[in-house]
Image: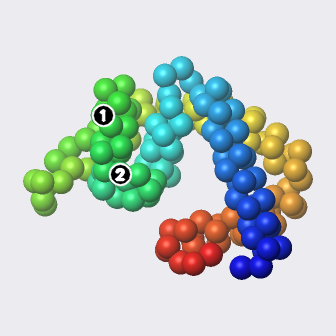
Amino acid sequence: MTTGTSDLANVLFSELLMAEQLARNRLSKVLPKGMELSHFGVLNLLARQQSEMSPAALARAFHVTRGAMTNTLAKLEWAGYVHIRPDWDDARRKMVSISPAGRRARDAAFLAISPLLEQAVKSLGEDRVRLTIPVLRELRHRFEAEQPL
């Protein structure tokens, strides 16, 4: 990697990491009381999937350990936001679905964060955001595939 490319890569990843941290902080502040960003992420995915998922599949989707996902799911189950049941085909596994209360909590959280997200898009401009999404998506895919960037 040349010095110019190295500097560009450093700036790119510094900006990505700073933006991610600031976004997490801002979003966490507007989420309903007691809801963490990880909770919203799981509820949002389950609501969009409209089907059950195993804890292992959820852990893979969020690129976290099974232990971390188990912790998140335990909190969501305690709050009544998810139902966890045994997998009827394999008793060693469990299946997770969003509850009606979880759907309401997800919807409330989405309403709380939407103005923040919409303002970000508005201030940057829809055209610029549309141009940025494919680049960020490609970076994500390369990281997921553990391909060289």
Place of residue 8 in the rendered image (x, y in percent of width and height, measured from the top left): 80, 67
* Mark toward the viewer: 1 or 2: 2
Amino acid type assigned to the residue bearing label 2 in the image: Thr
Picture residue at 12% right of the left edge, 54% below the top: 92
Picture residue at 36% right of the left edge, 25% below the top: 79
Q: Secondary structure at mark 2?
A: loop
Label 1 packing within 10 angstroms: few (<14), some (14-19), many (20+): some
Q: Relative to 8, is 27 above or below?
A: above
Place of residue 145 in the rendered image (x, y in percent of width and height, measured from the top left): 49, 74
Q: Quadrant of residue 11?
A: bottom right
Q: Residue furthest front?
A: 3
Q: Is residue 94 left or right of residue 32?
A: left
User: Which residue is the site of mark 1?
Assistant: 74
Can see residue 123?
yes
Q: Quadrant of residue 99?
A: top left
Q: Relative to 112, is 136 above or below?
A: below
User: Which residue is the site of mark 2?
Assistant: 65
State which tag comes first along the sequence, 1 or 2.
Answer: 2
Q: Secondary structure at mark 1?
A: helix
Between residue 50 and residue 32, name the one nearer to us: 32
Marks 1 and 2 in Cβ contact (< 8 Å)? no
